[in-house]
Each structure stands twice: as structure tokens, then as C-alpha cells.
Image (spheres, rainbow, N blue to C red):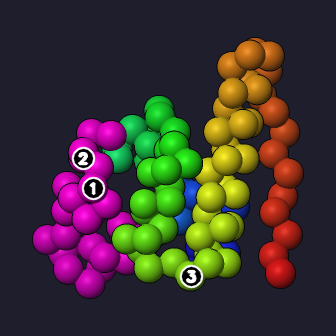
Amino acid sequence: MVLAYNDYREFLKQVLLSRQEKNSRYSLRAFAKSLSISPGALSKVLNSVNNLSHQKALDFSKVLNMNETETNYFLHLVTMNNLTRRLERTQGTPVVELEVLSH
């Protein structure tokens, strides 16, 4: 469940790992196909090279069958990550991440 994560990338990596544990032949390519994104683009997202757009995050939440609370939380994680990275690029210094408190 996404609510247990502070980083949307870690959540997506765990979903992939979980699927691979159920099916040893399940690949990044298969995961990307299920999410309607190219394997290269998904790899760049998972490796923090690229960010997810709000729309793509919303699409992912639907494919991953998230409920409204999970979707909102996932979108929040994506938005916060994108803002943090944008600040780091413009200011040239890392932004201290705040710990997300669980409910």
C-alpha cells in the first residue's frame, strides 16, 4: 500500500518486485507495458533521472487500482518530489526532505 512509503519511486519499485516474486519472468518491460509507458521512460523514473508528470501519476494510480486516499497520497508524493527537485536545480543545493508522518 502506497501509504507506507515516503517516496513514490520506492513504492513503484516494490510493486515491480512484488510482481516479480509472484512471477519470476515478470520484467520491467511488462511492468512498463501495464502502466502504458516505455520501458526506458519507466527506468528513468525509477532511477531518478526523470520525474512523473501529474497526469502520468494519475494514470498509474488507476492501473494500480488505488482508492481515492491512496491516489491523493501518491499524487502528493509525486508533486512534493517534483517541487523538491525543481528547487534543487534552481538553488543548486539539496533541499532537506521532511519526514512524512503516517496516519
Rendering coords of residue 9 (x, y %): 53, 54
Please say if 101 is above or below 6: below
What's the amino acid at mark 1? Answer: Ser
Which residue corresponds to the image point at 27% horizontal and 55% vertical from the top-left? Answer: 36
Q: Is residue 10 visible?
A: no
Question: Rounded to the nearest whole Å, what is the CA distance between mark 1 and mark 2?
Answer: 9 Å
Q: Can you tell which of label 1 and label 2 is closer to the viewer? A: 1
Q: Can you tell which of label 3 and label 2 is closer to the viewer? A: 3
Which residue corresponds to the image point at 43% horizontal and 71% vertical from the top-left? Answer: 62
Residue 53 in the figure: left or right of residue 4: left
Residue at the disc numbered 2:
39
Please say if 79 is above or below 50: below
Tag on residue 67? 3
Rendering coords of residue 21 (x, y %): 30, 79
Q: Is residue 38 magenta?
A: yes
Please say if 84 is above or below 38: above
Q: Is residue 19 visible?
A: yes
Quadrant showing the C terminus: bottom right
What are the residue bounds of the magenta stretch? 15-41
Say which label, 3 or 2, has the lower sequence index.
2
Mainly helix, strand or loop, the magenta region?
helix
Number of residues whose C-alpha sits closer than 10 Å to that of mark 1, classed few (under 14), some (14–19) or many (20 or more) = some
Number of residues whose C-alpha sits closer than 10 Å to that of mark 2, classed few (under 14), some (14–19) or many (20 or more) = some
Which residue corresponds to the image point at 33% horizontal and 40% vertical from the top-left? Answer: 41
Say which label, 1 or 3, has the lower sequence index.
1
Q: Nearer the viewer, residue 64 or 92?
A: 64
Which residue corresponds to the image point at 84% horizontal and 39% vertical from the top-left? Answer: 96
Residue at the disc numbered 1:
36
Query: Does the residue at mark 1 contact the one at mark 3 (Cβ under 8 Å)?
Result: no
Helix, strand or loop at mark 2? helix
What's the amino acid at mark 3? Answer: Asn
